[in-house]
Amino acid sequence: MDLNLFFIFESLGYVESFSLIDVRLALGIGCCAISGATFYLDKHSEFKESINLVAAAIVLYSILASVLWGWSKFVEKNIKFVGYKKSQKLIFKSSANKTDNLYSYEIKIGDNEPIIGSIEYNKVFNENGFLDFEEFKGYLTKEVEKIDKKKQ
Amino acid sequence: MFSITQRFQTLSNTALTYAIYVAVAVVATFYYQLYFDGASSVPATVDNISIKSHFKSSRSFGSMNKKPKENTKLTFDIDADLSPLFNWNTKQVFVYLTAEYPGKNSQASNKVTYWDKIVTSKEDANLELKNQRSKYNVWDVEKTFRGREAVVRLEWNIQPHIGPLVWGSTVSNATIVYPDSKVGGK
Amino acid sequence: MMHPRQLRQQIHQGLNFGLVLASAFMFWKFLSVLTSSESPVVVVLSGSMEPAFQRGDVLFLYNRDNYVDVGDIVVYQVKDKSIPIVHRVMNEHHIEYTTSAQQQQQQQQQAKSSGSEYSPLVHTSGGKQLLLTKGDNNPVNDLGLYGRNQGYLNRDDDILGVVKGYVPFVGYITILITENVYLKYAMIGFMAISALLSNEE
């Protein structure tokens, strides 16, 4: 379901901004880079000589990995989409609760009050289990309009 | 929804956590059991030790340069009861007779093994050996033993079914003095 | 040029896979540094330590002890020989190099006269230990396994670590994988398929 957000919001005029995601990817690439460098170091030197460097690399890696984990868990949390329309910022968060079959979301545009709502899965999925795109899009468009109206 | 890598990751994470719990439990109970059974002071006596010494010149007797090297053998009595070392986790006990003696100066030390045995069950744990001959020819880093004094101990090592290996020494304590043989003697 | 969101999607998936490998490797290195041993976990390959260890048992090594004791089980690798061997220490001879009191005084005087704040270490500045090993299940000691003019193992150079604990059988699967060609290909095939399949979200 989250995959389609992009298309929906773009049609409403919001251009996606990837800064949150990019930071996470950069952290991840950094971790892999440290790991790769350690591997290279390991292959090209004696164990006793490199042990201190390897220890330093391990510490660096752990720090970076914890930052990555923290970023993903606390900064990004449930944010699934961030977009800009003429300097207005839209943040879309969503989460799916396994127990009550609901897709919960929160839409926040600019400095306005966020709208918190939820959609029951069976309202937007048809019998064959496929997402009814138009239905879903309609839902979210209505929500966005609600906020726009409030602004005015 | 979940890729295979994600599933594998969660699976291995839970498996690892459980493994750690089990490991801690095994180690704790094993050590406690040994302590409770009195493994820190296994009763044993080693006495009636006699030393024989010969000079050999081949590599298999420790001589790297074809020059004569003093080889020693012991004959001894052992009386030991190793049963405190046997519990649910004991796979076998490796028991060995060592002699520890000083080296060229106060910072040098040596320790050698004359005899060892593998005990696999509690029933065989009671050792009563008379006039037992040592299994190995023992040589020193130096050419001769120079009449030094050595402390002879009976030590043990438990190989568990799973978990940490445990080492210890029985209460036995005997002292021997090596003969002061000159190089070239028989 | 791919759509920016799709590009990130691909990177994200590749990263997931890469991070799994990276974290596994870094954990292994962490154990290695912790135990100061090149290979902190080894699998028993031969039967020379039976009945204590069988092929397939997994051993945990520790290498930070300065001196190894008689009776300890060590993993060693003779220079220029490729297989590490797990055997027990029979004999050990060691010497500690310490600076005598006289030498210490000399060092301190030298330091003062050169105007440096350096105060030399007081005690042990190294040591050397020679070991003779033997497999429990072998009738003779390991002299035949050492180098041509080598009468002893050197604790610092030849020893990879001391065995502190073990888990039975678990390592047998690695023996099977390296020795059984079919299993090897099966594993590779399995990994390839799972990598392809993991492209689903």
Image: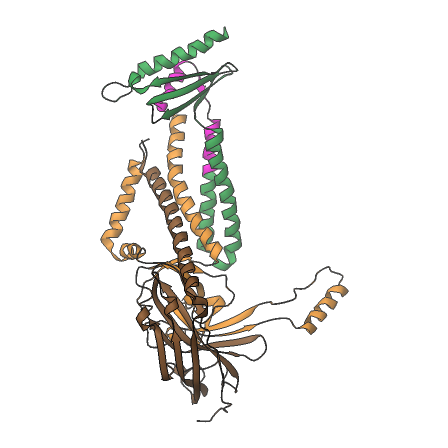
Chain colours: A green, B brown, C orange
Q: Nearer the viewer, residue C133 or B16?
A: B16
Horizontal arrangement in the rendering, residue A80 relative to residue B149 (left or right): left
Image coords of residue B33 (percent x, y): 40, 60
Q: Determine the residue located farthest toward the top in the rendered image.
A: A152
Q: Is residue A17 magenta?
A: yes
Image coords of residue A15 (percent x, y): 44, 19
Q: Please, is residue B60 above or below residue C50 in the view?
A: below
Magenta residues, start to end: A1-28
Task: Residue at 37% x, 32% y: name it.
Answer: C10
Name the chief secondary structure element in magenta.
Answer: helix
Q: Determine the residue located farthest toward the bottom in the rendered image.
A: B185
Give the quadrant of the C terminus of chain B: bottom left
Q: Is residue C197 visible?
A: yes
Image coords of residue B65 (percent x, y): 45, 84
Q: Nearer the viewer, residue A36 or B108?
A: B108
Q: Nearer the viewer, residue B2 or B154?
A: B154
Horizontal arrangement in the rendering, residue C185 relative to residue A38 (left or right): left
Horizontal arrangement in the rendering, residue C138 relative to residue C99 (left or right): left
Q: Please, is residue A48 above or below residue A105 in the view?
A: below
Task: Residue at 50% x, 51% y: name it.
Answer: A54
Q: Is residue C60 visible?
A: no
Give the quadrant of the N terminus of chain B: top left
Q: Is residue C25 magenta?
A: no
Image coords of residue B55 (percent x, y): 43, 89
| Count of numbered circles in the view | 0
- The answer to which image quadrant residue B14 occupies is top left
Horizontal arrangement in the rendering, residue A137 relative to residue C96 (left or right): left
Task: Residue at 40% x, 26% y: name it.
Answer: C5
